[in-house]
Structures are given as structure tokens and as C-alpha cells.
Amino acid sequence: MKIIKRQKKTRVAINSLFALLAIAAMVITVYIGSTPRQFNLQVGDISPYDISAPRDIADEAETVRRALVEMSHVQNVMIRSEEKSNASHEMIQSLIAQVQDKRDALYREPIIQVIPDPTESELPGEGTQGSSIERPRRPDSQEIGIAISSLISAIDQSLGVVLPSGDADAMIRMDEDRFQHLTATILSETGAIVAKTLDSAGLRASISETVIRLDETLEYYTDDAALTGRLLSLLLQPNVEYNKDATDKARKAAYERVINNPVMVNRGVRIISQGEVISPEAKAMLDELNLTVGAGFDWVRFGSTLALVVLVSLVAILYFARYSSDLLFATPRNILALLLAVLLPLVMSAYLARDYPLASPIYFAAVVVTAYFGLRTSIFLSSMLIIITMPMTAFNPTFPIVAILGCTIAALFTKGTNRHDNYARIILATSFVNAMTTMLVGLLQKESWGLITSNVTQATVSGGLSVIIGIGIMPLFELIFNTVSPLRLIELSQPGHPLMKRLFVEAPGTSQHSMMVANLADTAAEAIGANAMIARVGSYFHDVGKLESPLMFTENQLGDNPHDRLTPLESARIITRHPEDSMTLGRKYRLPLPLLRIANEHHGTTRLQYFYDKAIAEAEAKGGAPPPVESFCYRTPLPSSRESAIVMLADSVEAAMRSEGVHKLEDAEKLISQIIRGKIDQDQLKKSGLSFADIETITQSFLQVYSGHFHERVPYKPAARTLERTAKDRQYDDE
């Protein structure tokens, strides 16, 4: 254990040293590659060159001119007038008061009516006696018409507006409850509107919004929404007035806004033409752009480059710590391979990007990293490499777009490559995407056809050659760094491999088991989009550790079972050791890391339930305490990739199907569902990245394979039922 920890610390130290050296190399490379070509020119000299801006720079004179123009375009600032707001509110209140007066005159004068008293007899010669009551009047049409005319006239004289006769009629005739509701609505909406700062257009819009809202929200008196809008439009006035101080501040802000965002001379724009006399302004611009001979060391640019590289490196470390932690503790050879895959295109970019910004061969990294370290790592590192390369291209805007799409398509076509002729597809696809992307970006930027043609040529040639070099260098990487590529996986999958030969001769049952697991894993991985080649080849070698003691595993036994003579704890210790033995033997035969990871993770921390139950039974029979469950569990890592998880499931399913003797597809479906549910219940798949949809697809893929063995059609339905587990038959818990 101490030796392992010491080896791990040594490995981390060496990897850290490699990383620091790589960071230093990146900083120097990016600084040199981003240094522009310099010219020996002074004020008054005649330039023998056409000089273009290597980066964007501000044009101060043009900036000031545009700032003055922008300031002159600022309109007068209008602010809210409390006086005008109050005037509008008072007009509304005056209207309501006058309407209320007219209504009171019409409806609230009492009528006295004499009612005879039946208890008193009427004597001859005496008048009728009785009592009187008061009740509202009921005006006739003529009185209502007079009231309407009087109201219109009064409003015209007092407020200076002409109230439409229809609106006056409506307000005079409506019942008291409705009028009170209308009054409350008008006053409320008036207060809300005049609280805003509104010119004529804003006032109209606000009134229109009010009418729409009232029309949607009023449950009673819905016609009053339109009436409210007409009255507000008639009486409310804009409540803004000119403010000199605010106008001056707005113009000053407009001026400063342009000054703070200066007019830029874009990269590639000619700033000095051949034969042009160098003016003081031109010399100052050349000095600022670091284009003159004698300019000192640019500490600002160097410091910025260092900070950028360090920041990108920290992001990369965070990525590996979270998603590929095994790489942080990988062998130095693998780390060196990864760093070289990034550094080689970066160094080449230092010589190409200055004159040909789209010729950076970063697609090399996308192909190599995908082949050896996976698609996700490739896309991430390609993105980081593009960021670091940007200063060397003078931050060319076309470069990151073309590079991201080109690297992505190169990585996608590299992933899953399992035949030599597929390499041509990677080359053609990368070149085609680069060419199309460059042309489309040029058209969007309305560049000249000459520039578009030049850029397309750069991107196409760079994409094709980068991929060709990447494919060509793969055998060298495999030889030096013992990494894995599709070509290496094809080689390892051949039956003539020494380990597979040993497995076939010394542990034939395990060999047959591995072949069946490979079929299951390959089908499942392909169905969910995982790396089917790694899953298949990893299945071939996942149990090679059983070669250390093949007769201890049921598939290799010929009748005699050595476990009958061992205690459950001894049996468990032997069986749970085989993933570690597989790791050791795989390293001896130089198996690549992804296959070693599958061999080490395919049991996770699952429990040998059979031997645990047997140990408990023996302890109870002797009256002792039950043994600790940890002694009957595998002590290997949980599956950290989809491929490892698929091999885990395929291994358990194949062993269970063999031990249960299942020959019907319906029973197989139940058993597979039970196996997978058991892995989920024991948290064996939580680091694998598999979703529940992936698990359902894997289940159907397993059934598809077994349907060929059973000669039955797969019933495509969710596998949600269980099958009772027979511990004795399923000895050693699928080993």
C-alpha cells in the first residue's frame, strides 16, 4: 500500500513538472508568435512598404469628430411637470363634479304625496287629511335632454372642451351604482396616468393600454372601458416640459459615450502606403502598434500572455479534476502524449498564423486527442488551444469560428473510427467544413472574393494536412506512449493476441464468457452512442486476471469446486482479487489505459451475496457474530465511463443468464431488469454518465442479442418486472 502511494506521489510530481514545462513553452511560443514584423522608419521617411494594422487600434481624430456629431443629435430633454399633472387631474374632477350636480338636480328632488288616513272619517265640508313621503324623481325625456344640453354647455364654458352628446347622455342616464363605479375607475386611472412622464404620443399609448386592460378586467359595466378612454383622451394633457440642465447632461453623456468607445482601425487595414511620408501621427500609430525597430520588450503583452496561458491551464486542470480525474494521475507517458498533441500545433501556428491566420494546424490536436483520450476531452482541449492561438492570429474574427467547427467535425469523425478507409472521411469532412465555414463567414462580412478565396485556401489546406499528419503520427504515439487509437484497438481485437491465446487455452470458460460479454457490450454501446470498439475490446480483456487461478471460477470448473474446501472469506478474497489481477496482467502486456480501466472497474464495489450469505449461515450455526459485509465486496473503483458501465452490466447479465439457464426471452427480460435494478440500488452506475433512457436502450440491446440465441423476436416494451433470484444456482454473484 505504501509503495502504491509512493508511486502515485512520484507520478503526480512528474506530471506536474511536465505541465509546468508545457506552460512555459506555451507562453514563449505565444509571445513570439504574436510579435508583429517591425520596420525601421522615422518621421519624414518615405515608406518602402505597405503597412497594415496587425491589430485593432483607436482613431482619436475620427472619434472626436463623431462625438461632436452625436452630441448635436441629442434632442431636448422633457421632464414631468407636477403642475400640468395636477391640472389634468383637476379637469377630470371638475367633469365628474358637474355631472354629479346635474344628476342630483334630476334624480334627488323629493316628491311629496298625500296618502288618505283610513282611520279617520271624512266629514262633509272638511278636506282630505293624511301623511306624506319622499322618493326620487323620475324625470321625463324632456328633462333629461335639457340636463344633457346644460351639462355639455357647462363643461364647454368651464373646461374648454366639447363633451360628446353620446357620452353626456350615457353619464346622465346610467343608474347611481354604475355612475359611482365609473367615477372611481376614472379617478383611479387618471392618477396612474398622470403619475407617469408622458408626451402626446406616450399619453395616447397609455390611454390605449388602459382601455385594453379595463376591457379585459371589468366584470360589470364593460361598456364603461371605452367611455373611460374617451373621457381621458378628452381631458388629459401631456405633462412634460423642457429642461435645460438635463439636456446639457444628455449631450455631454452622448459625447463621452463615443469618446469611451473610440473609432477603431481594424486589423488588416492599411495604415501606411508605399511611398507615403511618415507623419508624426503615423509614427505615433506605428509605435503604439509596436511596428518600429527599437521598440523595447513588451512587458504588458508578455504579462497578458502569461496570465492567459495560466488561466487556460487552470481551467484545464479544473476540467480534468471534475471529468477526467484519472488523467491527472495517469502515467507520465500519457501526460506527455497529451501535452505534445497540444504543443505541436501551437508551435507550428507560431510560424504560420502571423501571415496566414487560418492556417493554424490545430485540427491535428482534435484528431490525436480524440483517438487517444476521447471526444469530450478533445473538444475541450481544442477549444482551449483555439483561445491560446488567438493572439498569434491577431485575434482574427474568422479563425475561432472556422477552428471550432473544423475541430468539432474532425473529432466527431475520428470518434468510433474502426477501419482504415474511415481516415479519408475525416480528411475530406474537415477540409469541406473548413472551406464552407470560411466562405460563409467571408460572405457574411462582405469581404472581397480575392480575400475569401485566399482564406478558403488556407483553411482547407490546413484542415486536410493537419488531419493527415495527425493520422500519420498515431503509430509513433502508440509506440512511444502506449496509448490507444482505433488502429490499436483493431490490433488488440485479433484472436492472435498473446493474452487472448492464453485465455482460450488456460481458461476456456472465461474466454467464451468474454466473447459473449463483448457481443452484448458492443451492441449496447453502439445503441446509446458510446465507443463500441472500446467496449468490445475491453470485454475481451476484462477477466484476464482469472488466469492467475482459473479453476476458482465456475465457468472453468469441470466438476470439482475448490470453494467447497475453503471458507467463504477465503473464497471471497480470491474472487474479488481478479479485477486487480486483470489490471496487473494488462499492464504487463501493455494494454492501453481505457481497457485497463474497464478491467479494474467492471465490478465496482458490488457484493458477493452468495458467499456472504454462506458466511452468515456458518456464523449462526456456530453462534458467532456475522462477518463484516466489506470483506465480501469488491474494492475496485465504480465505473467512470459509459463503456465501463456497459461492460459491468453485460458481464453480470451474461453470467446470470448462464447460471439461471434461461431459454425464453420473457424470462431473460425479467432477469436483465433485475440485474440492472440491483446495480442501480447499489449505486454502481452513479459515476458512469448513463441516463435512464440509456439503461432502457441497453436492456433492449441485450434482449436483441439474446433473441438471436433463443430464435425469438424482441418484444419492444419497458422491462419493469422482476425474477426471483436463486442464490445457489447463481453462484459467486456473477463473479
Image (cartoon, rainbow, N blue to C red):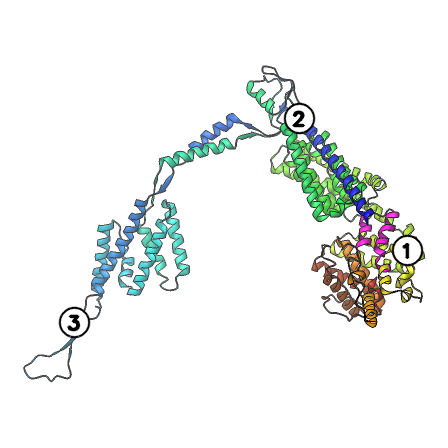
Mark in the foreground, 1 or 3: 1
Q: Amino acid at mark 3?
A: Ile
Q: Position of residue 110 (x, y in %)?
A: 19, 68
The residue indicated by pointer 3 is 112
Residue 534 in the figure: left or right of residue 271: right
Q: Amino acid at mark 1?
A: Glu
Mark in the foreground, 2 or 3: 2
Using the numbered discs, state the Cα–Cα distance from disc 1 to disc 3 in whole angstroms: 122 Å
Using the numbered discs, state the Cα–Cα distance from disc 1 to disc 2 in whole angstroms: 63 Å
Residue 95 in the figure: left or right of residue 13: left
Q: Magenta stretch?
A: 574-601
Report the number of numbered marks.
3
Image quadrant in which you'd find residue 177: bottom left
**Crowding at mark 2 (Cα within 10 Å: few <14, some 14-19, many 20+):** some
Mark in the foreground, 1 or 2: 1
Q: Position of residue 436 (x, y in %)?
A: 68, 40
- The question of residue 108 being in magenta is answered with no
- The question of residue 591 being in magenta is answered with yes
Using the numbered discs, state the Cα–Cα distance from disc 2 to disc 3 in whole angstroms: 107 Å
Image quadrant in which you'd find residue 120: bottom left
The residue indicated by pointer 1 is 548
Image quadrant in which you'd find residue 629: bottom right
Question: Please, what secondary structure does the residue beneath circle 3 have?
Answer: loop
Quadrant (top left/top right/bottom left/bottom right) for the C terminus: bottom right
* Residue shown at the point (80%, 51%) measured from the top left: 597
Q: Amino acid at mark 2?
A: Pro
Q: Position of residue 571 (x, y in %)?
A: 86, 62
Q: Is 306 drawn above or below residue 224 in the view shown?
A: above
The residue indicated by pointer 2 is 36
Give whichever of 334, 668 is nearer the camera: 334
